[in-house]
Image (cartoon, grey):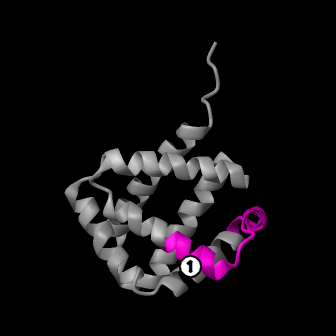
Amino acid sequence: MALSEKDISAIRRTWAAAAALPDLAGQLFYGHLFRIAPETKPLFRNDMASQAKKLVATIAFVVDHLDNSSSLFPAAADLAVRHVQYGVKPEQYRPVGEALLWALGQLLGDGFGPEERDAWTRAYGVLSEHMIRSVYPAPSEG
């Protein structure tokens, strides 16, 4: 993953603070996601409390493996396959990223400044692009 040590440090520092409030993190994330992309709500058929726990565990795995793409990218591709099975479309990755950044901002306040936001944006961009490419074929050229 093309993140600097500074990015990884910022992400890990902010995640440590956000992960201390896992229930609130999930509530904020899903509440905002459903406001900005209401079409995603039917994709979540499980109890939202357990869904929030899965979200926090997944983000924790990502954060722990930011400097180990040989573990992170295959796991992300597997997650992308499951997302396709749930009905997730490529265009739905954008509002998920927006909801993540928004939730982190709400949880961390002044602790989520431009440096931290930019690091998370880069990480989410690389990871979501990898996930999308893993399961959705590129349109043919020519």
Q: Which residue does the image show at 33% across and 47% down from the upper left?
A: 69
Q: Which residue does the image show at 61% across and 31% down from the upper left?
A: 137
Q: Which residue does the image show at 56% across and 43% down from the upper left?
A: 132
Count residues near mark 1 (Cα–Cα under 10 Å), then give few for <14, some for 14-19, many for 20+.
Answer: many
Q: Which residue does the image show at 67% across and 78% down from the upper left?
A: 48
Q: Position of residue 142 (x, y in %)?
A: 64, 12
Is there any visible trace of residue 88 in the rendered image?
no
Counting labels gives 1
Task: Give the left or right position of residue 14, taking residue 103 as reference.
Answer: left
Q: Position of residue 134 (x, y in %)?
A: 54, 39
Vertical placement of 23 versus 42: above or below?
below
The furthest residue to the left = 5
Residue stretch in magenta:
36-56
Q: Secondary structure at mark 1?
A: helix
Question: Residue 4 magenta-drawn?
Answer: no
> Overall secondary structure of the magenta stretch?
helix
Vertical placement of 33 versus 123: above or below?
below
